[in-house]
Amino acid sequence: MIGRLNHVAIAVPDLEASCTQYSSILGAKVGKPQHEPNHGVTVVFIELPNTKIELLHPLGDQSPITSFLEKNPSGGIHHMCYEVDDILSARDQLIGSGARVLGGGEPKVGAHGKLVIFLHPKDFNGCLIELEQV
Ligand code: CO
């Protein structure tokens, strides 16, 4: 069902410092910050030859990243995103096998303008999984 690894998302307490680290120290191609008020995040994409890294920083008072950073003050891996061809059939298969889809199960438009769902981390070894329809 799942295809390529689309990105790994890392929550970061200092977005500018993390961008500098990835560009200057790790020598990666770092994009411009994108504010996503609907998701409560500012996102920076880092292009790697085989996947992307998504740096996430809280935006606004209701950000889902705020509590994550309270628990992980120096930042940490927030989720992995796998590609799927058909998000509705993937969702239905997953629900049929007992996995929990967050937020009521309806796909939403994610940070790349594509449909995404999130799967409960307790069902997947403590890892929050995002599925993105490509
Ligand atoms: Co993501």
Image (cartoon, rainbow, N blue to C red):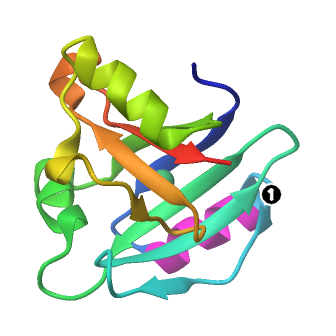
Observer-nearest of 65 and 22: 65
Q: Write the residue at 50% across / 73% down.
A: 43
With respect to residue 131, does 32 lie above or below? below
Image position of 10 with respect to 46: above or below: above
Give coordinates of residue 32: x percent, y percent.
67, 83
| Horizontal arrangement in the rendering, residue 7 relative to residue 117 (left or right) | right
Residue most toward the right?
Answer: 49
Q: Is residue 114 left or right of residue 61?
A: right
- Magenta residues, start to end: 15-23
Q: Which residue is mark 1?
A: 28
The residue at 70%/30% (across/down) is: 4
The residue under the point 17% across, 53% down is 103
Q: Secondary structure at mark 1?
A: loop
| Visible residue check, residue 77 | no
Disc 1 Cβ-to-ligand 1 distance below 8 Å: no
Q: Position of residue 8 (x, y in %)?
A: 54, 43
- Which three-letter amino acid code belongs to the residue tagged 1? Ala
Tell me if residue 73 is in the magenta stretch.
no
